[in-house]
Amino acid sequence: MIIAQFVVIIGIYVYILLRAPQFRLAGGIVAAALLGGLSYYILATNPEPRAEMRRIEVVEVTLSDVELDIGIRISELSGRVVNASEKFDMTGILLNVKLFDCPTADSELSECYTIGEDSGEARVTVPPGQLRSFNASLLFTSLPEIIGEIRWTHEIIGVRALERKF
């Protein structure tokens, strides 16, 4: 979709330059500057966002004392996190949380209805071998009224990390 919008904008730009000769010189200079800036951005930027998700494996991260505070609009997941990696600084944890309406507090999750699910990210910097507190905001939309007991699960679905600079 973005490519189609980009093509339409370029088409309109070229049409204006063809229909209004007084703007051709300025339009050409602007187009050259934009292409130069785009080329510089593509060549100079580091592909870091993709690499940062592959540095620390999920099994190298340990969560403890995890609590979920379910609010009217926004829920907060908090706890402690340990980075067991030996050479990377953790910069974020991607989490998935599911809410269940269970007949009793001791029911198996297979007997419960899933009533909400959301993913969120806790932005926390944790050096190798250290522990920090974390906090992630979640938004559970259209939660029904709880008939039984509410239960929840959490899962780490990704870890952001940067190489240590020193």
Image (tube, rainbow, N blue to C red):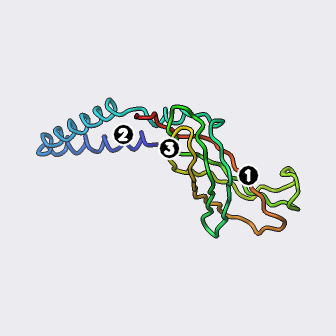
**In the rendering, which numbered label is found on residue 111?**
none
Report the residue at 53% width, 38% height from top.
128
Which is nearer the eye, 114 or 152? 152
Amino acid type of the residue tagged 3 in the rendering: Thr
Q: Is label 3 or label 1 in front?
A: 3
Q: Is residue 24 left or right of residue 157?
A: left
Which is nearer the eye, 24 or 82? 82
Instruction: Using a 10 Å C-alpha cutoff, classify the residue at mark 1 as few (fewer than 14 neighbours), some (14 to 19) or many (20 or more).
Output: few
The vertical placement of 154 against 35, above or below, is below
Real-space Cα distance between discs 2 and 1? Answer: 45 Å
Residue 103 at x, y = what percent?
Answer: 88, 62
**Disc 1 designates what residue?**
153
Between discs 2 and 1, the one toward the N terminus: 2
Q: Is label 3 or label 2 in front?
A: 3
Q: Is residue 57 left or right of residue 29?
A: right
Report the residue at 14% width, 43% height from top.
26
Real-space Cα distance between discs 3 and 2? Answer: 37 Å
Instruction: Using a 10 Å C-alpha cutoff, classify the residue at mark 2 as few (fewer than 14 neighbours), some (14 to 19) or many (20 or more).
Output: few
Real-space Cα distance between discs 3 and 1? Answer: 23 Å
Residue 127 at x, y = what percent?
Answer: 51, 41
Report the residue at 58% width, 46% height from top.
131
Residue 97 at x, y = what percent?
Answer: 68, 52
Residue 117 at x, y = what percent?
Answer: 68, 54
Q: How many marks?
A: 3
Which is nearer the eye, 61 or 52? 61
Amino acid type of the residue tagged 2 in the rendering: Val
Between discs 3 and 1, the one toward the N terminus: 3
Q: Is label 2 or label 1 in front?
A: 1
**Disc 3 designates what residue?**
91
What kind of element bears circle 2? helix
**Disc 2 designates what residue?**
7
What kind of element bears circle 3? strand
